[in-house]
Each structure stands twice: as C-alpha cells, then as structure tokens.
Image (tube, grey):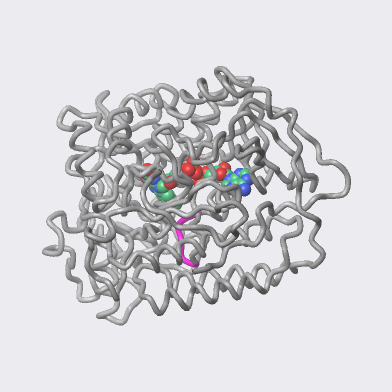
Amino acid sequence: MPYPVAKHPYMLAATDGEPARRFYDIIVIGSGIGGLTAAVGAARRWKVALISKSVLRDTTTFLAQGGIAAALSEQDSPQLHLEDTMRAGAGLCKEEAVRILVNEGPDRVRELMEICPKFDRSGGDLVLASEGAHSVPRIAHAGGDATGSEVASALAQAMRSGSRVQVLEQEFVVDLLTSGGRCVGAVSLNLRTGEFTLDYASATVLATGGSGQVYSLTTNPAVATGDGMAMAWRAGAAIGDMEFVQFHPTGLYADESPIFLITEALRGEGAYLLNHAGERFMVGVHPQAELGPRDVVVKEMVKQMSAAGREFLYLDATHLDCQKIRQRFPTVYETLRDRGFDICRDRIPVAPVCHYMIGGVTTDLWGRTTLPGLYASGEVSNTGVHGANRLASNSLLEGLVFSDRIVRDLDRYAGASGGSARRLTIELPAPATGKNEPAQLADIRRRLQKLMTADVGIVRDERGLNRALGRIGSLLEELEPPGASPEEYELYNLITVAGHITRAALLRTESRGAHLREDYPQRDDARWKHHINFRLKGDRREGEVFGGYG
Ligand SMILES: Cc1cc2nc3c(=O)[nH]c(=O)nc-3n(C[C@H](O)[C@H](O)[C@H](O)COP(=O)(O)OP(=O)(O)OC[C@H]3O[C@@H](n4cnc5c(N)ncnc54)[C@H](O)[C@@H]3O)c2cc1C
C-alpha cells in the first residue's frame, strides 16, 4: 500500500553556479548530547565539523531536567537496570543493546562527571533520584533540575577547548550525500548567507534529535522536526519503530509551545497525581502508583480525563517540604511561579504531551545505520534500547554510550575508507519552478500538527489512522517541491516522519508500550513481537516494510 512521504530523494535543487565544497574526516550533525559526545571523542584523532541548524545550546538536551540513569550506587547493579529497562520496553527491547547501555553507562557517566562538576552531591556522595519504573534511586542530576543545560555546557566547553572541531552554527543540513551506496557527507544551507555547501567526509554522524514538532502539544523545542529521520530515509537508510512515540504524563496544561515539562523526579520525591475528585487514581492501577511506567500512567490519565470530560488532571506537591522542593527543583519552581502557580500551595494542572521519539534511524550495536558511512546517535537513532516504551532518563545515557561506541568504530571505519570522498561528484535535481508562500507553509504545519494530535496521538484506531494518512497525503499535494528555505525543508521532513508514524501505527494491530490501539487493546506477542522497519528500495519511492533488525 503506498503511503505519503516527501517526493524527492534530494530536497536540495541544483543552484546557479557550483556550491562550495568542504572536506573533513568526520561530519557530526547536531549539538545535543549525541553530537557533542561524538565530536569531542572523534576530534582526538580526526578532522571534525559539527553542524547545527541553530545555535549550539538550542537543543532538547539543554532542556533535560530529571537527569541520567546509571547503576552508580551500591544498592544498584547493571543487571537491575537492565531488568527495569526491559520491563518498561514491553517485550521489544533489543537485549544486547540494553546490556551495552547498562554495562558501559556507569563509566560514561563518571567520565562526564570529570568535565561537569555540577552533579549534585551530599557530603561528597552522589545524590540519586527516583523516577518512574526504576526499582531503586538511580538518576544522577546536576544543578537540581538543570541537568541538561549543565551537561550540554560542559560538553560544549570541552569541545571548544580542543582546536580540532570546526563548529558551524546556523547551517541547516538539507540532505545526506550518497554515492555508490555509501553516505559521503551532507549538503547544508547557511542560514545567514543563503549559500549551499557540499560537505564531504569519510563518515557522517547523524545526531539531529527527535521529532516532537510533528504534534501540536509537545515538550520538544522548535528544532525537533525529525530532519535526521527524514533525510536518512531519503538517502536509503532503514528507519524503524516509528509507531512508538512517548507521551509524558506531566506537561503543564497551558497554551504554549513548547509545553513546559514538570519532571518525573517530582513524583519521585512524592508528588501525587489527582483526578477532579481529588483522588490518587494511580493507586491500585500499578504497584508503583504514580511512578509506574509512562505508558501505564498516561493510559490511566486518558481514562480519567475522558470520564471527567476534562482536558487535564492535577499534580499535587503541596504536602511535601517546600524548602526541599525549591532547592531540588529550582527550574520547575521558578517557571511555574512565572506562570502564576506556587507549587508549594497550588495543585498544578497537567496533561500528557508528546515528549520523545522512540523510533528513528535503525542502528546496530556500534551506531552504524544500514547505509555504510552513516552513523546515528541520540534521539534520532533507533538502537533498540527503549523497546516499545522508554524508561525515564535512559535517553541522555543512550546518547553518551552509543556516541562513545561510534567514536571507537570510526577509528576502524574512517581509517579504512579515508580520502575517497574527495573524488566524488553529486547530481542534484533541477531547481523548483513553483513557490511555497511562508503563510501557507505555517498553515500546513499547524494543520499537520493538529491532525497528528487528534488521530495519531495517545489513543489510536484504524479509522483515525486511515483518515490521518489520507490527510497527510493531501497536505503533501498542496505543496510545491521545496525551494531553498528552512521552513520548507522542515515541513517536508515533518510530513515524511508523520507519514511513517501513521503507517507503522496502522500496521501494528495490537497495543504495546506507547502504542495504544482502541480497536486492538491487547498485546499480541504471537503476531507482533517484532519491529517494523521502512526503507527505500532502489527507485521505488513508496518504500518497503520489513521486520527485524537486519
Ligand atoms: C523538556 C525535556 C526534558 C527531558 N528530560 C530528560 C531527562 O531528564 N533525562 C533524559 O535522559 N532525557 C530527557 N529528555 C530527553 C532527552 O533530553 C533527549 O532525548 C536528548 O537530549 C536528545 O539528545 P540528542 O543529542 O539526540 O538531540 P538534541 O539535544 O535535540 O540535539 C539535536 C541537534 O540537532 C540539530 N539539528 C536538527 N536538525 C538539523 C538539521 N537539519 N541540520 C543541522 N542541525 C540539525 C539541532 O539544532 C540540535 O543541535 C527530556 C526531553 C525534554 C523535551
């Protein structure tokens, strides 16, 4: 069955005159935890460029609050972390990948602590927090609830203090370059000068983050438009597990974008979820009550909201020690105060919101995608560690661990293939003739986000998914081929990702982890204990679906 994806293998059209060329050993695309970790490591040996479509700190990583999960205490062990991760993943975690995550995680976090001294300690000992579905306190955090900004700043500092990384900010990577079945670099648009450049490299590391902007209500920043997943798909790499989109239970119920997230660690400190009758509705639903896995909590929240005919529930921390809350969660306390709430006195209205893309560009245990020369790390990747539902605070860890493995693999791969990229020429499609007006682009983006929230959101069914697929196709038809603006590129990418999420959600006729089908409410291991991957095959633009991890 055909399904809507962007129409062209390369979005970039040939421009007048020859684009400039730059040559590196390694290109890293993205400046979050995945990209910074890869760039810092690779620069020890290679000539590296790190490209970001915005400024360095404009990332999801910068917003992370709760912290990083790793077995760092005596009461914990990698085996326990593995069991928790696998249980949350609802039967779809790739065990080998999880084993790597939990075994290598503690050392990677300790190394991070050497360059980021702001991890919270008490009397010299690391303070570890509790979060949903973790059986012991395991979350290391920095600056209270400012882990992401502390970690990202420390990694950026480490990168800048070494001289070998060329940092290219405000350069929008439009497409990956391929030749002879390999990725040989990327094409980028300089957002300040409007010029395109062809960047050639022996290996390219995709670390472009998630795709939360596909939905109208999301905690993700504006940069999270799924560019990496869409460009990898166009280049012929497999993308998989796209139906698994994680919704976070406690987004602030407010008319804003992105939605402010209230970290799960607050529930770890004892905050309750209450319904409109003031009852703790999670007690009796899951043994860990409010700290059950995210999919379980979100599912119950949807039930409670629908029974009450309301769009929100409450988070209640009023019974906790106010001084402690202010100290431990300064970002949450101050942000809520700026919006008129006192978390020590007020119940806070919250609702589940799109938070994390579990699927992405499918990789092996070394971060290699199915396209030689292309690696993926962080939220853009689909390493298999999250299964059908990510365990809280495992994503920063995933970026750290797998970027480190990519760096180790680069030392083998890039060394073996270096230099050949210099001789390649790339043929780009003819320039677009039509034009997409900015107001029309903004309108289509809004309509896409709304329809994804309504029909491909937390609870799905065949009718809604088919309707969404049809409408995504119609939105695509309204567009001219992309010209040369980032708004056009992002919209094409969003449509590509939305099409794949919807198609995969339609195919998976069961409920599992973050994927809830009203018409197929049961988990069906006999038919569905496998993964859905998509990839382009030759010139067949409609792509193909295949199971497993290859
Ligand atoms: C509010 C919030 C709180 C969170 N808290 C936690 C937490 O406590 N613990 C945890 O483990 N996880 C948390 N997460 C999830 C976690 O933060 C992310 O999954 C992780 O930071 C993603 O890192 P990344 O390196 O993959 O991508 P990002 O940090 O999103 O970085 C992506 C980079 O790619 C660049 N980019 C994208 N497209 C292009 C393009 N076309 N060309 C050039 N550059 C491009 C962007 O500009 C950016 O630099 C949280 C997420 C949110 C939204």
Q: Residue at x 25, y 44 (%)?
A: 85
Relative to 22, residue 436 above or below: below
Q: Which residues are magenta?
A: 216-220
> Picture coordinates of residue 518 (x, y %)?
29, 74
Between 273 and 390, the residue placed more toward the observer is 390
Q: Quadrant of the C terminus?
A: top left
Whether residue 330 is visible, yes or no, is no
Between 71 and 93, the residue placed more toward the observer is 93
> Picture coordinates of residue 278 (x, y %)?
20, 72
> Picture coordinates of residue 374 (x, y %)?
55, 37
Q: Is residue 492 left or right of residue 292?
A: right
Q: Say whether residue 217 is magenta.
A: yes
> Picture coordinates of residue 387 (x, y %)?
31, 49
Relative to 117, residue 80 above or below: below
Between 134 and 549, the residue placed more toward the observer is 549
Q: Say whether residue 320 is magenta.
A: no
